[in-house]
Each structure stands twice: as structure tokens, then as C-alpha cells.
Amino acid sequence: MSKLELEKYITQSLNMALAMNGETSYTNSFSIEISEEGFSFIPRTPAGYVISDELYEKIFLIANASLYPRYTLLKQNSAYFIPRETDDIHMQRALFFPWFKGISERLVVEDLEKFSEGNQSQQISIMQNLNLNYNKVNSIIISGQSGSGKSYFTAYLLETLYRISRLIIIDPKRDSPSRWARAHNIPVIYPQANRSKSDFVSQVNESLSDVLTLIYERQGILYENPNHDFEHLTVVIDECLALSEGVNKQIKDSFMSLLSQIALLGRATKIHLILVSQRFDYNAVPVSVREQANVLIQIGNISSKTTQFLFPDLNPEGIVIPIGKGTGLIQVIDDEHPYQVLPLLTPTFYMEEGIL
């Protein structure tokens, strides 16, 4: 399809479905302009319709469905205005709809161990068309209800990170992360049968305190040599709510404080957090931890209710999300990716029996 044909196709889709008091392209009320990065809706003002967030949302809903699967529109939290290079005041502004070609495609790994061994870079493959540079990752937050595929995806991340980062694994449920750690001879912190929950969280706090001490040590090294290259260290906590609920207040406050400090100070010293939980309200982690995370992942059922903690300003209506386990939304906030939320399909992989 040529550029002109695509412009006509989008224009026709909007003419047929966009109710604007009889205003259409046939009445010269708007036009469509295509670029590599997306398309522009150019209103001719003064207009007989309101150019607002509501209009932007309507255009998104129509165009995203019409363009699927050739293009995926990137959802915005509000109307995205851009100026146009023209002296005509009637056409000096446009609503812009960024896109990427194609759709999100699931990564299928036949042998995860061999796949991870072959990855000698600092890249983590998430989908066919999405890789993360771990040097630019601060914290990763993974949310989703029970059975959504969180543990499966966490096992993928552990196997991938095993060769590029030292790992500290905290597993309150003694579930798949513990089995993975046992298979790889990596120490894991989990509840012991003869210890109370507060005693367990105290043990977690001791480990997090050691991590914070290491951050301070590395900061001192960076002060003398800003180009010093450190080994990655990743703290993985499965089911944060299981740690923060039902424990002594003083111990819980210490846990929250340590987590906040690591999230705030860890990036420059290559110390990362991977946090997994069914939800991320204030009981699971402090708000500052959520704000510092630059990889946000919501797996499972997607609605305004499930996205309220990781994507509070996002209206997920209109985003085309495939059906099945391990699907949802992802947002990567760095200088290599668009800040918009993308449909996510977590990798399918095969590894040792008994871990999952």
C-alpha cells in the first residue's frame, strides 16, 4: 500500500466512524498526513468540533483497529499536538498519532539455556521487536493476578540475567524462583519452618542493608573514578505483598525504607531491583519505588482497575492485546524506546523439567 493509498484509507475510516457534527474530509474539515513515525490529523480551524482529548481518543480507537495488524498505534495519555511548518494559521497544528510497523510478536526460545549462553551482550530479549539494554535498566516491576504467567516470565528473566548479573533472590512462597536457584546453585532467601514471618522479613532486611552498603561503597569509587565499570547486581523479590503484609510495623517500615533507598540510589552503581507482585499499591512497595522503575509490566487481564497502580494515567481502551497467558502491557522508559505503553507477549521457552 502506497503512502497516498494509506492516507486515503485512514481518511475514509475516520469519515465513516467519526461523528463530528457532519464535519468530514469531504467538507474540507480535516486531512490526514503520513510520516514514518505516524500519522497526523490536521483540523482546519476554526472548526465546528472541539479539538480535545476526547476527539483524540476517538480517532485513536478508530485508527488503531483499522490499521491492525500493519501498524500499532502508541497510546497517549492525552492529546498529542504538534506544530506544522506552514504560514497558514488555519492549518498550523495537528494531532499526532505515533506508531510502529507491525504488531508485537512473541519470542519463542527452543532451548533457554543455550539461548542465554549465546547472549554475551547486556541485552535482554523481551519480544521479537523489543530488547532491553540492561545497562539502562533501573528497576523492573511485574504485576499480574495469580495464573497470569508472572512466575514463568520471572524464570525467563532469571535465566537470562544469570550470566550478566549477580543475583540475590528473595522468595516468600518458596516457589519457582527457589527451584530455579537450587538448580543453579544460587543462594535464595525463603521462610524457614521454624521461624516467624517477622523473623524472615528481618533476614530480608539484613540482606537489603548489605546491598545498600555496597551502593555507598560503589558511590565512593565513582566519586574518584566516574568511568569505573561495576558488575551488575540484581535483587529479585517474588510476591512483594507476601513480605509487607502481616509483619511487625517497625520491620515493615525498615523493609520499605531499604527498598526505597536501593531504588533511588542503585542505578548509577549497576544495582537493580526486579519486583513481582499481584498488585503494586502502597502496601506492596512505596510510591517512590514505582516511580523509579523504568520497566513496567502488567500481565493478565487489562482494565482500568488492573492498570491503576503501574499506569495510573492510562486508559487502556482501544489497545489491541492478544488473548492468552503471558500477555499484557509493557512500558520502557529510557532513551532507546518510545515512552508509550506497548502490547506485550512474554517469551515462550523450554528449560529443565521441574523448575516451573
Image (spheres, rainbow, N blue to C red):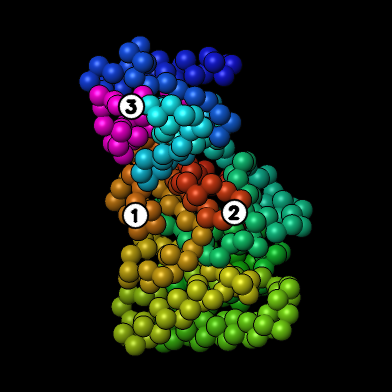
Report if residue 274 lies within the magenta region: no
Q: Is residue 22 left or right of residue 327?
A: left
Q: Report which residue position mark 3 lands on.
A: 45
Tell me which numbered mark, 3 or 1, is placed earlier along the sequence.
3
Q: Which mark is residue 312?
A: 1
Q: Is residue 52 above or below residue 27?
A: below
Front one among 350 and 48: 48
Front one among 335 and 72: 335
**What amino acid type is highlighted by mark number 1?**
Pro
Neighbour tally class for label 2: few under 14, some 14-19, many 20 plus, Cα within 10 Å: few
Tell me which numbered mark, 2 or 3, is placed earlier along the sequence.
3
User: Residue 81 placed where, x, y %?
Assistant: 41, 39
Residue beneath the point at 52% across and 85% down: 209
1 and 2 marks in contact (CB < 8 Å): no
Q: Which mark is residue 335?
A: 2
Q: Is residue 235 left or right of residue 20?
A: right
Q: Which residues are magenta?
A: 43-67
